[in-house]
């Protein structure tokens, strides 16, 4: 979807450090100098839409939801689709002489209307979402992953987060797991080409390898990965509880946190359900917390996302004891 941003006719707004803090669920003092530098150079200007252009975006989104040929998360052909997608990143990685810049996943699209504080906006910079993602993940990783020895990213996909983690934490072991073998190859190529302490492995959310034990003092990370499990995340949750990682960081779209009385939110709910993305996880964690099996440390809706959904909401938690 390409939208004329009408920049010459509209006043710019811009995301400031205080806006990032609000979106992250923290305060400006908690945002590190390197993140503040990324905010300064990232060009986070945007314009709000007039009624006519906003209606055009809404109409386009509704047509895609109601009449588009949308795939369903985790269906019989899902593995093939992701294998194909990550193979493209693997080829781009080789062509770029193993530059991490080749790892940007295709679902982070340029020049698209974005969701911000329950409305649509048009970014001035085509790389707005990617730049936002870099600030967010750098803050997130420092905040929640600094104190562990090993980081396991399940559903590591293109390897973009594995590469970022390896550069941020050269002293840590980073394990990237995905059900696509092309993803495993990407991570192992990063280890070979850069000498990073990273390892790629194949792992299936629906059929977890319970023989794969997570190291002591480790973190579990997912970003836009568990969304693919729909309501079939039970086996993976059991795997997590059996391994008792020091912290679990799940960055995912959470359907239950939208406001159905807001039109922009309601369309995100429609898209989420049409795609069959995961549901019920926050309630399940609350149930387990009531039984003393987990501790939920933070839940935060992102209020930022792509044209169709908010994919960056935070659930930070940890098991309190091993569950057999």
Image: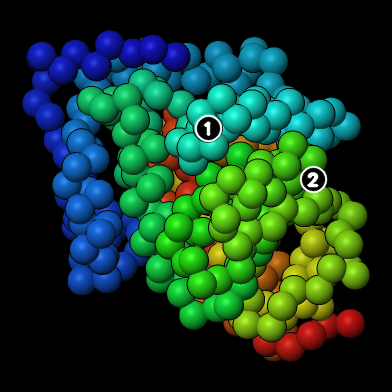
Q: Of tags 1 and 2, which is closer to the observer?
A: 1
- Relative to residue 76, is residue 258 drawn left or right? left
Pick the front one: 45 or 186: 186
The residues tagged by marks 1 and 2 sit, at their Cα atoms, a distance apart of 25 Å
- Relative to residue 2, is residue 49 drawn left or right? left
Q: Which mark is residue 153?
A: none
Q: Quadrant of the N terminus?
A: top left
- Relative to residue 268, is residue 154 drawn left or right? right
| Residue identified by numbered label 1 | 97
SS at mark 2?
loop
Q: Position of residue 33 (x, y in %)?
A: 21, 63
Q: Position of residue 182 (x, y in %)?
A: 74, 37
| Residue identified by numbered label 2 | 179
Q: Can residue 139 be seen in this view?
A: yes
Relative to 279, residue 237 above or below:
below
Pick the front one: 218 or 316: 218
Residue at 71% x, 67% y: name it: 284
Residue at 26% x, 27% y: name it: 125
Q: Position of residue 7 (x, y in %)?
A: 16, 17
Residue at 79% x, 45% y: name it: 179
């Amino acid at each position: 979807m390409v939208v004329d941003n009408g920049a010459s006719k509209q006043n710019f707004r811009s995301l400031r450090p205080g806006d990032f803090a609000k979106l992250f669920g923290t305060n400006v003092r908690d945002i590190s100098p390197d993140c503040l530098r990324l905010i300064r150079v990232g060009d986070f200007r945007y314009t709000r839409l007039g009624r006519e252009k906003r209606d055009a975006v809404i109409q386009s989104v509704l047509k895609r939801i109601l009449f588009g040929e949308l795939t369903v998360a985790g269906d019989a052909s899902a593995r093939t689709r992701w294998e194909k997608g990550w193979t493209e990143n693997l080829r781009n990685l080789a062509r770029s002489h193993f530059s991490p810049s080749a790892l940007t996943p295709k679902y982070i699209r340029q020049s698209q209307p974005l969701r911000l504080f329950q409305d649509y906006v048009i970014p001035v910079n085509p790389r707005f979402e990617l730049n936002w993602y870099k600030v967010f993940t750098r803050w997130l990783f420092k905040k929640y992953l600094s104190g562990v020895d090993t980081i396991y990213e399940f559903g590591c996909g293109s390897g973009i987060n594995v590469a970022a983690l390896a550069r941020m934490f050269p002293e840590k072991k980073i394990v990237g797991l995905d059900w696509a073998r092309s993803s495993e190859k990407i991570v192992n190529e990063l280890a070979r080409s850069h000498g990073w302490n990273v390892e790629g492995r194949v792992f299936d959310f629906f059929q977890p390898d319970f023989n794969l034990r997570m190291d002591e003092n480790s973190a579990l990370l997912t970003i836009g990965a568990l969304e693919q499990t729909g309501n079939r995340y039970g086996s993976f949750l059991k795997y997590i509880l059996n391994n008792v990682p020091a912290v679990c960081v799940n960055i995912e779209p959470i359907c239950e946190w939208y406001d159905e009385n807001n039109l922009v939110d309601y369309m995100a709910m429609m898209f989420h359900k049409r795609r069959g993305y995961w549901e019920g996880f926050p309630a399940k964690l609350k149930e387990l917390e009531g039984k003393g099996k987990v501790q939920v440390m933070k839940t935060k809706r992102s209020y930022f996302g792509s044209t169709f959904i908010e994919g960056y909401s935070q659930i930070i938690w940890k098991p309190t004891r091993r569950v057999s």
